[in-house]
Amino acid sequence: MTELKVENLKHVYPNGVTAVNGVNVSISQGEQISVVGQNGSGKTTLVKHWNGLLKPTDGKVFVGDLDTHEHSVNVLARTVGYVFQNPNHQIFAASVKDELEFGLKNIGLPEDEINTRVEHISEEFGLTEFLEVNPYRLGFSLRKSVGMASIIAMEPDVIILDEPTTGQDYLGIKAIRASIKKLKEQGKTVIVVSHDMPLVAEDTNRVLVMCETELIFDGSPSELFATESILKRTNLLPPQITSFMHKIGKSSASESILSVSEAIDKI
């Protein structure tokens, strides 16, 4: 069981810009978390501390018993997998197969286990026919799927998805949401950084809202979309069905309708 803990985290970039200031949060194994906020709010800076891509300027970050300040990305990546928003920042191998195998080899799995995992993850993400293709010959959506598949195949306890649905078509989004559901069933912790409010509302159960370097909200999606002061301060727009149900008076002051199926039941 891997708990993530942040204690009074502050991060200042080399150019002097403070990106995260005074953040405290704990995340238990198996939680499905969204981290939201406007560009520049500090959300990506926050999550990059959990796999060691960034180190605290002040405060502490723990992954289980590991103080991230004292351990390398290579060590932390065995527990926390990070899928970049831009797959070009992650992909480097000459073929999709090599890309999927790299992390598995890096953590020392035997060849038969590597082959099994590559076969399964390729089928899950619709990559089987592209295994011998150079990833950079694929479209953006498929490249993003390759990046995600390569991390999920390593089966870390915690998986961070940075804007997973950006640039994805309908089938890509469907595959991502199915993958998040599967990871939840496996007891994985999934942390999604996203502007996709339907994804936030329907596929995660806790939301962290960053605003101007600070964590200003920590609660359920239902509570968030019913809290007008937070929405106004951050310019976050609820899913269309949520807004509609508020307008017709079918949502309470403290709870929101998050999906079409919920709306049908309510009406």
Image (cartoon, helix red, strand yellow):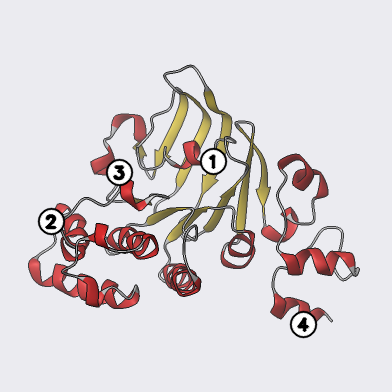
Q: CA distance from mark 4 to mark 2?
A: 49 Å
Q: CA distance from mark 1 to mark 2?
A: 32 Å
Label 1 with label 2: CB-CB less than 8 Å: no
- Residue that label 1 marks: 43
Q: Residue at x 26, y 52 (%)?
A: 91
Label 4 with label 3: CB-CB less than 8 Å: no
Mark 2 belongs to which amino acid? Gly
- Residue that label 3 marks: 76
Residue 229 in percent (x, y) is at: 81, 44
Query: Is label 4 or label 2 in front?
Result: 4
Q: Earlier in the sequence, mark 4 or mark 3?
A: 3
Task: Classify residue 247 as left or right of residue 150.
Answer: right
Label 3 with label 1: CB-CB less than 8 Å: no
The one of 42 and 49 positioned closer to us in this rendering: 42
SS at mark 1 in the image:
helix
Mark 4, Cα crowd under 10 Å, few <14 / some 14-19 / many 20+, is few
How many marks are shown on the rendered structure? Answer: 4
